[in-house]
Image (tube, rainbow, N blue to C red):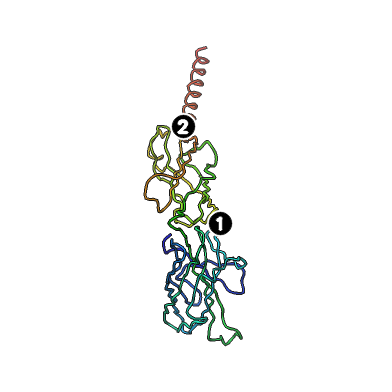
Amino acid sequence: MTSLKNIFLFGTFLSVLLIFPKTTFAQGISVSPSIVEMTISNEIIKNEIITITNNEEQSFKINLNTSSFSVNSDDSLIIDYESAENFTDWFSFPLDTITIPAKSSKEIPIELAIPKNTPSGGYYPIVLIQLKSEQIPQNQNVGISFQFGIPHYITIENENSKLQRTAEILDFSSKGFIHLTPQALFTTTIRNKSKTHIKPIGSITIYDPKGIRQSNTVLINEKFEHLLPEKQITEIHKWKDETINNTLFPPIGTYKAKLELYLEDSRNNIPIATSVKSFYVLPYHYIFYITLLAGVIVGIFFRIAKNRKTRQ
């Protein structure tokens, strides 16, 4: 995923995480990078730089800590404080408390050391930054305290234990079978079968009864969200052929929807999974034509019957 990934902020008095873009931190505080992603081997020491910007008129003190995180169904991050894997032995921080002066930025060096014999797989630590105002507001007797974090998506992959990255399609379905217009509502559920995180992407291509590829291809995981091991993502997509109003006789019959699933970093065009779904389209044009034709036939019938009655 690109650096547009959200980072989160929550008040220490709340137990529910609140999601904020990285540029809209409360108290005018922003952090960079908002997310860290890397693939390394164990016994590796890696240095990072975190930049914290204070746009306020008052300085702040921060404390650094670590924990693990998971991702829920709406792609927000949840800190697992009770996890035995808190990664405290992975990270080294320069000081226990760091001051960020008003209207300034500070670069904080962080050392990441992967312990020896760490098994290959995906690991998800988060660097927690607790922030507390040095200025106590006049109408309060306590400082304002917040906590925010930088999630790390780490894949440990050694030369003798390469990880296979793959996913499966758990569900590919459409709502209803007969449609009065060339449109359909698709539900897709993708599960990560890897030992590390992946970014599954894909597309739903529609073919009309003649096998002609239709417009408006549907994109899967268009935001390039991470999918952690054994986690799944469900999306609902609407496809509609806008060209139906440009023809008097649009295609009628069975349409086919083909879902093709790829990995974002795949260097070939071979999908890792495919699925095909059929749905029937009876355009309203034909219902109108049939109704109109039936009306004409009935009108002719009554006209003939009336003429016969007149002759008698």
| Residue 288 position within the rendered picture, expressed as x and y whole percent measured from the top left | 47, 33
The residue singled out by tag 2 in the image is: 253
Mark linked to residue 242: none
Q: Is residue 68 above or below residue 226?
A: below
**Residue 16 located left or right of residue 186:** right
Q: Residue at x 42, y 73 (%)?
A: 49
**Secondary structure of the residue carrying numbered label 2:** strand
**Of callouts 2 and 1, the N-terminal one:** 1
Q: Is residue 283 above or below residue 18?
A: above
**Secondary structure of the residue carrying numbered label 1:** loop
| Residue 253 position within the rendered picture, expressed as x and y whole percent measured from the top left | 46, 32
| Residue 71 position within the rendered picture, expressed as x and y whole percent measured from the top left | 54, 60
Q: Is residue 220 above or below residue 15?
A: above
Quadrant housing the N terminus:
bottom left
Q: What kind of residue is marked 2?
A: Gly
Is label 2 or label 1 in front?
Answer: 1
The residue singled out by tag 1 in the image is: 73
Q: Residue at x 41, y 61 (%)?
A: 2
User: Residue 54 occupies which quadrant of the picture?
Assistant: bottom left
Q: CA distance from mark 2 to mark 1?
A: 36 Å
